[in-house]
Image (cartoon, grey):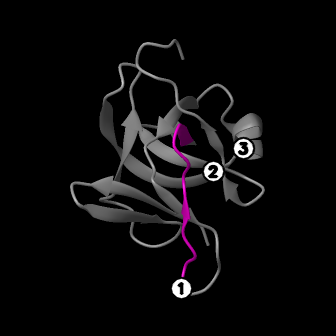
Amino acid sequence: MIILRYRFNCMLVSLPEFGDIQHEVVPVLLRDGDFRRVPWGGYVDIEEIHKRYKHLARPVKLDIVEYSVSPGDWPIWRRVPEGIVVQGAIIGGKALGVVADGVPRLVERHQANERC
C-alpha cells in the first residue's frame, strides 16, 4: 500500500492509496516556489499515463515529506530527501501521485529562480 505524507502547519497529513479521498487535498508546487492545494485523486502508474492519459495529464511536483510502500497496518516511513519531490500529474482537475514499479516517482525540485 502506498501512502504519502505532507506537512500542514505542525501536522503530517496522510494521503492513502485507498479509502475516502473525496475531501483530501495535496500541495502542488508552483514555478515561483509557492504552492497551491489541489483536490487529491489517488495514484496512477506512469505506464498508464503514457497509454491512456498522454494528452490529458499535466505534470506537477507534489510537496511531500514522507512516503511508505510497506504493506500492513504499520507503515515504514521514508523521508523524501532535500531537493527532491514526488512526481504528480493533474488529470481532470485532480492531482494524482505518479507511481513507477509500485513506488512513488521522485524527481528533482527546482528553485524558484530556475526554469522548470
Range covered by the magenta-colored residues: 74-85
Residue matched to label 1: 74
Residue position marked by numbered label 2 in the rendering? 44
Viewer-proximal residue, 61 or 51?
A: 61
Q: Circle 2 — which element?
A: strand
> 116 and 56: which one is in front?
116
- Residue 116 magenta-drawn? no
Q: Position of residue 78 (x, y in %)?
A: 57, 64
Crowding near pointer 2: few (<14 within 10 Å), some, many (20+)? many
Query: Is the C-beta separation of discs 1 and 3 under 8 Å?
Result: no
> Can residue 73 be seen here?
yes
Question: In terms of secondary structure, what is the magenta stretch mainly?
Answer: loop
**Disc 1 to disc 2, C-alpha distance:** 23 Å
Q: Are marks 3 and 2 in contact (CB under 8 Å)?
A: yes
- Name the spot of residue 13 as percent of width and height, x first: 34, 63
Left or right for 78, reference 37: right
The residue lying toward the viewer, choosing from 12 and 92, is 12
The residue beneath circle 3 is 46
| Badge 3: residue crowd in 10 Å (few <14, some 14–19, many ≥20) | many
Mark 1 crowd level (few <14, some 14–19, many ≥20, 10 Å Cα): few
Q: Closer to us: mark 1 or mark 3?
A: 1
**Residue in the picture at 46% in, 23% down:** 111
Helix, strand or loop under label 3: helix
Q: Give the amino acid at mark 3.
A: Ile
> Which residue shows up at 75% across the image and 35% down it?
50
Q: Quadrant of residue 116?
A: top right
Q: Amino acid at mark 2?
A: Val
Q: Residue furthest left?
A: 9
Asked if residue 70 is positioned above or below residue 101 in the image, the reply reads below
Q: Can the viewer see residue 88 in this picture?
A: no
- 15 or 18: which is nearer to us? 15
